[in-house]
Image: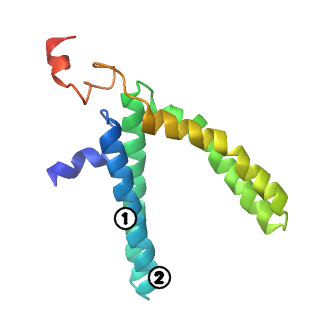
């Protein structure tokens, strides 16, 4: 169990490769949760709920550690993801009210924030060397040398 502890921690840094591998694993967990919820009548939704709650924690920790690698605090998730959440909820409301054009327009407004999050978290290299969140995950020996 000790090997999985870093996946639940909000401390430290994560470079791009573990970030993407964790995101891919979470996609698999969501797929399994959906399968359980649909196929197994009584116990499936309960098991799916447990999987989803655990994966939300792991996903949030993964995002925060990735921001730490970019030398940014967890608060950067607010301007990155809050507009996506707000515009998406407004789009669902517009779609429910029968206004497909407004829903499409609101969904388009999420695009710049989605691109920003994708580039910032998934594409850009982390800070070279140690930063206030810990040693460089690509070269942890620099923290010991003091460079």
At 69% from the left edge and 56% from the top edge, which residue is drawn? 89
Q: Which image quarter holds the C terminus?
A: top left
Residue 142, image x, y percentages = 19, 18
Residue 64, image x, y percentages = 41, 38
Question: Please, is residue 62 above or below residue 34 in the view?
Answer: above
Residue 65, image x, y percentages = 36, 37
Question: Please, is residue 132 above or below residue 147 in the view?
Answer: below
Of helix, strand and loop, which one carries label 2? helix
Question: Colour scheme of this structure image?
Answer: rainbow
At 42% from the left edge and 65% from the top edge, which residue is drawn? 30
Among the two numbered marks 1 and 2 on one chain, the one whose residue lies closer to the N terminus: 1
Which disc, if any, is residue 78? none
Residue 115 placement, left or right of 137: right
| Crowding at mark 2 (Cα within 10 Å: few <14, some 14-19, many 20+) | few
At 60% from the left edge and 35% from the top edge, which residue is drawn? 79
At 65% from the left edge and 39% from the top edge, which residue is drawn? 112
Which disc, if any, is residue 29? 1
Q: Which picture quadrant has residue 144?
A: top left
Q: Which picture quadrant has residue 26?
A: bottom left
Residue 14, image x, y percentages = 32, 36
Residue contact between numbered discs 1 and 2, judged by CB atoms under 8 Å: no
Of helix, strand and loop, which one carries label 1? helix
Q: In this view of the protein, which residue sits in the foreground, 144 or 122?
A: 122
- Which residue has dot 2 on it? 38
Residue farthest top in this picture: 147
Q: Which picture quadrant has residue 139?
A: top left
Q: In this view of the protein, which residue sits in the foreground, 114 or 92?
A: 114
Question: Please, is residue 59 above or below residue 65 in the view?
Answer: below
Question: Please, is residue 46 above or below residue 134 in the view?
Answer: below
């Amino acid at each position: 169990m000790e090997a999985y502890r870093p996946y639940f921690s909000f401390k430290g840094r994560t470079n791009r490769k573990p970030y993407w591998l964790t995101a891919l694993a979470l996609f698999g967990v969501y797929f399994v949760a959906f399968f359980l919820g649909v196929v197994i009548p009584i116990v499936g939704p309960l098991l799916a709920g447990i999987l989803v709650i655990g994966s939300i924690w792991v996903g949030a920790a993964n995002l925060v550690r990735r921001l730490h690698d970019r030398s940014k605090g967890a608060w950067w998730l607010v301007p990155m993801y809050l507009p996506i959440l707000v515009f998406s909820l407004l789009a669902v409301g517009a779609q429910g009210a029968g206004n497909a054009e407004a829903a499409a327009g609101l969904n388009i407004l999420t695009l710049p924030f989605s691109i920003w999050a994708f580039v910032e978290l998934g594409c850009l290299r982390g800070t070279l060397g140690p930063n206030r969140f810990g040693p460089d995950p690509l070269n942890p020996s620099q923290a010991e040398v003091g460079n």
